[in-house]
Structure formats: structure tokens, C-alpha cells
Image (cartoon, grey):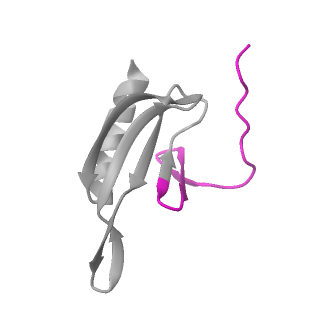
Amino acid sequence: MAEEIKLVEGKYLEYKGKPLVREGDTICYGDMNDKCILILEILSYKNEDGKNLPDNIFIQVVDPKNQTNILRQGSKQGLYEALELGLVWLEHELKK
């Protein structure tokens, strides 16, 4: 029997029609009912003009029902670059 995923009630920020949620240094993107989601883990920050900005980002595309099942992983410098690469990987895995 398939395990049912419990969804948290409330409104989420959406990007390209899918939920984008951040808790601490972890950012999750995607629909938990899809076959995979994107997880970005902020590993370090850099100080630029007095602001702490995400620097080193660990990227994973995982199965939401079993997050130990990692489909792709890597890292990038900067949140924009990490999100951009992660979205390409996620889209590719969802099309399989």
C-alpha cells in the first residue's frame, strides 16, 4: 500500500506553478506528489555590502517519498546558479 503524504495547510510561495519553501538553510521546490523534487542546501554564506548572501549551495533531485533515493546531486556557487541548474535537472528527471 502506498504511503500517503500529508500536506501542510496554508499558502506557499510558488515559482513556475510549484511550491517553493524555505526552512533555515534548506530550500525545497516542487510538488510532493511528483516523482521527484529539488532540494537546495545552503552550506555557506558570503558577506557582500553588509548582507549575508548564500554562497556554496548543495543541489539534490530526490524522490519525495524516499529522500534517500537521490537521482542527481552536485553543488554550485551562488543561489541563482544553483536554482538554475537544479531546475534543469528536475525538469529532465520529471520528463523521464
Q: Position of residue 74 (x, y in %)?
A: 28, 40
Instruction: State yes or no: residue 16 in magenta.
Output: yes
Residue furthest toward the top? Answer: 1
Q: Looking at the figure, which quarter contains the C terminus?
A: top left
- Up the image or down, 70 lies above or below 22; here it is above
Residue furthest toward the bottom? Answer: 50
- Up the image or down, 24 lies above or below 61; here it is below
Give me the residue at 39% from left, 34% from top: 90
Q: Position of residue 91 (x, y in %)?
A: 38, 32
Give the quarter of the image for residue 70: top left
Q: Position of residue 5 (x, y in %)?
A: 70, 32
Instruction: State yes or no: residue 39 in magenta.
Output: no
Disc count in the image? 0
Residue 94 located left or right of residue 53: right
Secondary structure mostly seen in the magenta stretch: loop
Give me the residue at 48% from left, 54% from top: 26
Give me the residue at 56% from left, 37% from top: 31
Q: Looking at the figure, which quarter contains the N terminus?
A: top right
Give me the residue at 55% from left, 28% from top: 34
Residue 93 located left or right of residue 81: right
- Up the image or down, 81 lies above or below 59; here it is below
Residue 90 located left or right of residue 55: right
Give the quarter of the image for residue 86: top left
Range drawn in magenta: 1-26
